[in-house]
Amino acid sequence: MLNNGVRNLHTCCLRFPYTTERPLLRAVSYRRTRRRRLLATLCSAAATAGKERKEKVIVISGPTGAGKSRLAMELAKRLNGEIISADSVQVYKGLDIGSAKPSARDRKEVPHHLLDILRPSEEYSVGQFFEDARQATRCILDNGRVPIVSGGTGLYLRWFIYGKPNVPKASPDIAAEVYSELADLQRDEDWDAAVQLVVNAGDPRAQHLATNDWYRLQRSYEIIKASGSPPSAFQVPYDTFRQECGSSAASSSHVTDYSVDTSVDSSEEINLKELDYEFICFFLSSPRLSLYRSIDFRCEDMISGNDGILSEATWLLNSGLLPNSNSATRAIGYRQAMEYLLRCRQQGGRSSPGEFYAFLSEFQKASRNFAKRQLTWFRNEHIYHWLDASKPLESALNFIYDAYHEESGNISVPDSLKMKKDVSSRREVSELKAYRTKNRYFVRREDCVDVLDWIGRTQMMNQDCPVA
């Protein structure tokens, strides 16, 4: 109602402009003078409100295989938008199939940002993403277009929306000192000793890092040396937001859930006003069984053909990289494919159907587990409106389009488009437990003959290919 009122006031301002005039004639009534002064005051207030209104940024996330990229693409066409990728793998050149990177045609039709900005041998942090994504957002808005951030990397999106921690940056001297202390351990592949070094320095959480995540281990050590405290000592803006909301919610009689309720808890509303932009966030997902089936088929698609994920994994191996050695090679799909191809190379480029199907099954299972973790993560992100990806795309497009143009800020997902956050019924739980993969292409032993022939032609041992 308030925003509608503002629009009406603007209309009034256009109809009755208030300007400096000659002294009013005595014949003009006091009532008319008072009316004009009131309109002038209201117009001034409306102009101020317009200046304070935040710029809008759309965020679309969802589990792997839910269809968020397609939704973002079609939405960008309608809203004159540009897409910012929030995917930790799409930043790497050459990793196209396994990351489901937008096609060259899509990127020509709609501008995309933060794609192909690094070599696979380079590291990319959430802090770097925050800086790059915020800069891209500013540029898009300055050009009069709509920023649409799309991706499933939860930590990227959390920092993008709420801000990044004020963690000190290590000086060149400290960075060089840390590198020197860890270099020998990394060369000797003595991960346990390196972790213990950082734990003893003051970061017990270092022992929970993924094995061989040397980048994050080094960064933790740098922070300790620069500040005397571990990374966990620095407050994350999102945590502050949730703590403040939680303390207020504890004394409130209702719990806010943006995907269900049309009202917003006052504590969350206050905190949302403190964000840099007006973020309009959506989480696109399907019923769990349907999602799992889609993921399994998607994995098959990525393997099929001569230019699939196995070809990209071969390129990574030939570049001198090993699985699980850095961010790119830890990515789901690439890690499994690289490990499988290494075994094939050790066998002289040979693989049996059983080994292939074991790789495919592992790839599919890892992808489903990743989707499950994404669902768990975003279930606690109350700023998102959950949408059912199994509904017609047009319905979601129309809803988000209208939500973007809604001036009141009150967004209510219609029942026909709502997606449940939890698996609640016993039947659903039972069906999930009984779920078994049913492949579409790779069903019989002979269905993988073409893939095994390709492996035989391309994975023969040579001096340039790593074997361990």
Image (cartoon, rainbow, N blue to C red):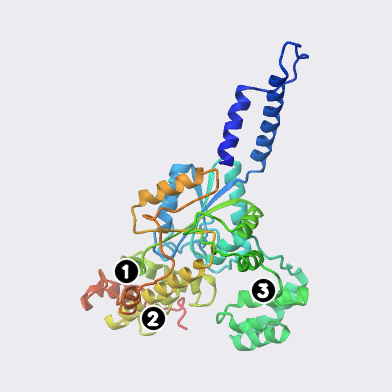
Q: What's the CA distance linking mark 1 and mark 2?
A: 31 Å
Secondary structure under tag 3 reads: helix
Using residue 459 as the reference point, say whether residue 206 is left or right of it: right
**N-term mark: 3 or 2:** 3
| Residue 329 position in % (x across, y down) | 49, 73
Residue 319 seen in the figure: no
| Residue 347 position in % (x across, y down) | 36, 85
**N-term mark: 3 or 1:** 3
Residue closest to the eye, 341 or 366: 366
How many neighbours does mark 1 have within 10 angstroms: few (below 14), some (14-19), or many (20 or more)?
Answer: some
Residue bearing the label numbered 1: 293
Residue bearing the label numbered 3: 219
Q: What's the CA distance linking mark 3 and mark 1?
A: 39 Å
Secondary structure under tag 2 reads: helix
Residue 345's label in the rendered image is 2
How many neighbours does mark 2 have within 10 angstroms: few (below 14), some (14-19), or many (20 or more)?
Answer: many
Q: Tell us which disc is closer to us: 3 or 2.
A: 3
Q: In percent of the image, x 77 and y 77: which residue is there?
A: 228
Type of the residue with mark 1? Arg
Residue 71's label in the rendered image is none
Using residue 68 as the reference point, say whether residue 353 is left or right of it: left
Q: Tell us which disc is closer to us: 1 or 2.
A: 1
Corner quadrant of residue 165: bottom right
Using residue 14 as the reference point, say whether residue 112 is left or right of it: left
| Residue 417 position in % (x across, y down) | 38, 55
| Residue 200 position in % (x across, y down) | 71, 87
